[in-house]
Amino acid sequence: MRKFLSGNEAFAEGVRLARPQVISAYPITPQTTVVEALSVMVEEGSLNCEYLHVESEHTALSAAIGAAATGARTFTATSSQGLLYMAECLTYASGGRFPIVMMNANRALALPWNIYGDQRDSLSLLDHGWVQVYAENNQEALDLALMAYAVAEDARVSLPVMVNVDGFALTHTYESVEVPDQAAADEFLPPYVTANRFDFEHPVNIGYSAGPEFNRYYQYEHHRDMRAVEAVVPEVEARFAKVMGRQYPGMIQTYKCFDADFVLVTLGSAAGIARGVVDELRAAGVRAGMLRIRYMRPFPAKLIARALGRVRAVGVLEKDISFGATGTVYANMLAGLAQQGIAVPSLDFIGGLGGDDVTRAQVEEAYAALQALAESVEHPADPVRFLGIDPVGQGPRPCRPAEADSPSPTEGGAR
């Protein structure tokens, strides 16, 4: 059935189709309407599950961990400061190998207080052992709700999955979405069965300690199984396409990269505007391309290197900054390219912070800067460009002078 849904409503439909047995819910803007929609489904009987109203985000994930430890399929959702409040629990969920699915509505972090969308929340927690995937539109958000369980519950993975949906840009924007029927969803996603659960008949030890002589093996296996996601995702998407008729591109999505001189890399909803600019440039005879990272963890370094191995310049458009360094996506991309022996001139375009619009004009300027970089083939000393603040082709303005360097009242007059 085709419906006109917001991103939050679409995701809630995907969760309903996945038949979770426990949902732990706590509201936070702009995630709230996901768990509100699910509560309505539970109340009207279209979703049969235990729905827990909890007192905080920390408790929401704690409850999901407890439910997963009994072998239940679980779901929770959060955003921004709520995700940070969950941070202590994130490693308990991933280290316990509980395949929880959580939707994160990407939102700016405080201070200054801001309810609008950027991706600093999820990107700041890449090292907590969760699979992280980013939706471009509402249809993908719905479909990822289903596919996330299939990836998380695969025996080769057994890790929690965080599905990231851009706050307001997707969560509160309405699009036409194809909602599968329950029979198709059940065919794609069978009931969850696991041995990693409390069992009175066959007791197991869950949540134990591991000292130095054993701990490294757990971290090794966690890393190994996170890397297994790279093989599982294409299999899950192939099965999804067979049942649902919609094919997804895997860990990354490339657009006209095969012969591109320069490529802009991004993730989430910003890919749409970049794709449109690429079409304009191609029509003018300019060989531009776009690459969307869908999965930030595990990081698809080999796939990105394969797509960018022959380009003359590459840029990253991201809604994140690691203060004093670069954006997190940019740092991951450069490290991934270096692993594959690739060094290419690059720029890091920081935009959309605090929900600021990433405009078409800004993206066009970013591509113009990449074209100039490709033609000069020089590695900029400072690659970071704040869209709307820095001249796009140049680095940041100089730092403000230290107080000691400022003119004194006698030297330069009253301040």
Image: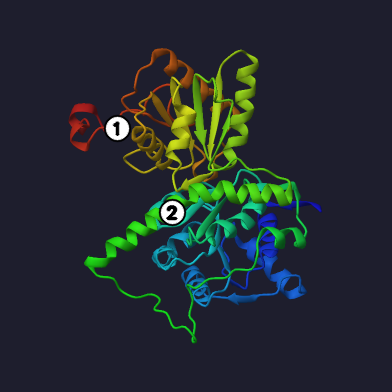
Residue, x 76% and y 50% (percent of image)?
178
Question: Is residue 2 found left or right of 382 in the rendered image?
Answer: right
- What residue did someone put label 2 on? 226
Secondary element type, mark 2: helix
- What residue did someone put label 1 on? 399
* Residue 193 x, y percent position in the rendering: 57, 70
Question: Which is more foreground, mark 2 or mark 1?
Answer: 2
* Residue 390 x, y percent position in the rendering: 42, 28
* Residue 1 x, y percent position in the rendering: 81, 53
234, 270: nearer the viewer? 234
Residue, x 43% and y 13% (percent of image)?
375
363, 233: nearer the viewer? 233
Residue, x 19% and y 27% (percent of image)?
411
Up-down: is 106 above or below 26?
above
Q: Earlier in the sequence, mark 2 or mark 1?
A: 2
User: Residue 111: in sight, yes or no?
Assistant: no
Up-down: is 24 above or below 364?
below
